[in-house]
Image (tube, helix red, strand yellow):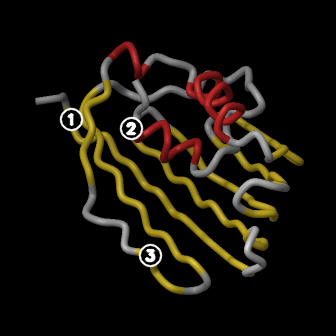
Amino acid sequence: MKSRIYAAVFIALGLAGVNSSAYAMSVKPGLWRYTTVATLNGKTVPAGEPENECISPQDASRDLSAAVRKSVEQEQPDCKVTEWNSTGASFKGSMSCKGGAATGTAQVVGSVSETEYSVKFNSQGMTREGVAYKASNISIGKWIGPCK
């Protein structure tokens, strides 16, 4: 099951989990609410309303770092992690991408606890059409209770 929380936390966009950590980042099973705010070249991108997702005990106990590693390797074949640091529940990383839809760099910083997460992602570069871009994405998620 591809969880939106896993996507928001780690594919946001693609760094956390590329390098496995001894710390198994996991979340509390139950109902989660997450919001995302994104900008592209200084303009806010419509992100929609906050969404809820029920995370099963099985999915919540997964090592998010290991689960996302496989996904990132499959979905980001033109990107390479250039720096990665993970301490406890916090992470920080950088990557470089060449080919595909764009060439550029990206940085991510975030934290995960059993009941909340926060991830900030920034990228900059050039699309394959030769258009410069700067993008950012902030995702915040909170556990709100048992699944209904």
* Residue placed furthest toward the left: 148
List x then y, in percent, for residue 135.
Answer: 62, 72
List x then y, in percent, for residue 93.
Answer: 77, 49
Q: Residue at x 61, y 31 (%)?
A: 71
List x then y, in percent, for residue 57.
Answer: 33, 16
Query: What is the C-alpha distance between the residues marked 3 and 2?
Result: 27 Å
Which image quarter is the N terminus in?
Answer: top left
Q: Earlier in the sequence, mark 3 or mark 1?
A: 3
* Vertical position of residue 60 compared to residue 14: above or below: above
Element at badge 1? strand
Q: Earlier in the sequence, mark 3 or mark 2?
A: 3
Residue at the disc numbered 2:
115
Residue at the disc numbered 3:
45
Query: What is the C-alpha distance between the residues marked 3 and 1?
Result: 29 Å
Q: Residue at x 58, y 86 (%)?
A: 42
**Quick one: label 1, few (<14), some, or many (20+) residues within 10 Å?**
some
Q: Nearer the viewer, residue 66 or 142?
A: 66
Give the amino acid at mark 3: Val
Give the amino acid at mark 2: Thr
List x then y, in percent, for residue 55.
Answer: 31, 27
User: Image quadrant of residue 136?
Assistant: bottom right
34 vs 11, left or right, is left
